């Protein structure tokens, strides 16, 4: 039996920030129709020339996306993560865009992270095994 999905709290988005967020949500909706290989290719192209996002920038983009889209506030993690990354890109930055799974019980998920920390997520780092990543391009030291 699956647990019911509780939508994220939605905050009002200022009028001046709505057009970009709506564009990101719409573009993300279209990208979700593509196979994973093409999504990764499109996002890799989109991130070119962007600076690494800060946690605050990524969280602000996520809040705007969730505030304007009920799908992104609910179970639409793929669309939410893509829209968040695209909105960050419109602002000149890029977070790490990730997809992954866990096995006990099986669950797939998509999210954005900065410096290895999931942004706006309830799971801790490492909860999902990362399968596909479009990184920010920031040089990071690995432990």
Image (spheres, rainbow, N blue to C red):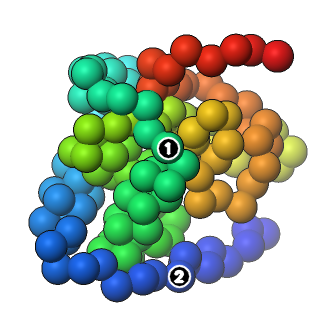
The answer to whether residue 13 is above or below residue 48 is below
Label 1 close to label 2 by CB (< 8 Å) = no
Quarter of the picture holding the C terminus: top right
Q: How many marks?
A: 2
* Residue in the image at 67% along x and 34% along y: 116
Identify whether 6 is placed above or below 30. below
Q: Residue at x 26, y 21 (%)?
A: 49
Q: CA distance from mark 1 to mark 2?
A: 22 Å
The residue carrying mark 1 is 54
Is residue 37 among what the camera can see?
yes
Looking at the image, the residue that sits furthest to the right is 104
Q: Is residue 142 left or right of residue 12?
A: right
Residue 79 seen in the figure: no
In what element is the residue under mark 2?
A: loop
Q: Quadrant of the N terminus?
A: bottom right
Residue depicted at x 53% and y 82%: 9
What percent of the width, then of the height, locates residue 62? Answer: 43, 60
Q: Residue at x 26, y 38 (%)?
A: 92
Q: Nearer the viewer, mark 1 or mark 2?
A: 1
Image position, residue 104 (x, y; %):
86, 45
Residue 103 appears at what percent x and percent y?
81, 39
Label 1 or label 2, whichever comes before in sequence order: 2
In depth, the one of 136 and 8 nearer the eye is: 136
10 or 78, nearer to the observer: 10
User: Which numbered dot is residue 9?
Assistant: 2
Q: Quadrant of residue 45?
A: top left
Label 2: few (<14), some (14–19) or many (≥20) C-alpha neighbours in 10 Å: few
Name the image quarter holding residue 85.
top left
Q: Residues within 10 Å of mark 1 (few under 14, many from 20)?
A: some
The relative height of residue 131 versus residue 109 in the rendered view (above or below) is above
């Amino acid at each position: 039996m699956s647990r019911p999905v509780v939508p994220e709290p939605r905050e009002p988005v200022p009028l001046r920030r709505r057009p970009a967020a709506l564009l990101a949500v719409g573009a993300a909706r279209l990208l979700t129709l593509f196979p994973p290989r093409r999504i990764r290719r499109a996002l890799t192209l989109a991130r070119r020339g962007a600076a690494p996002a800060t946690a605050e920038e990524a969280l602000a983009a996520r809040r705007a996306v969730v505030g304007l889209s009920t799908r992104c506030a609910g179970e639409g993690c793929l669309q939410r993560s893509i829209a968040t990354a695209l909105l960050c890109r419109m602002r000149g930055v890029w977070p790490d865009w990730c997809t992954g799974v866990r096995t006990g019980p099986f669950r797939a998920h998509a999210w954005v992270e900065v410096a290895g920390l999931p942004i706006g997520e309830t799971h801790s780092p490492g909860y999902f095994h990362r399968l596909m990543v479009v990184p920010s391009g920031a040089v990071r030291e690995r432990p």
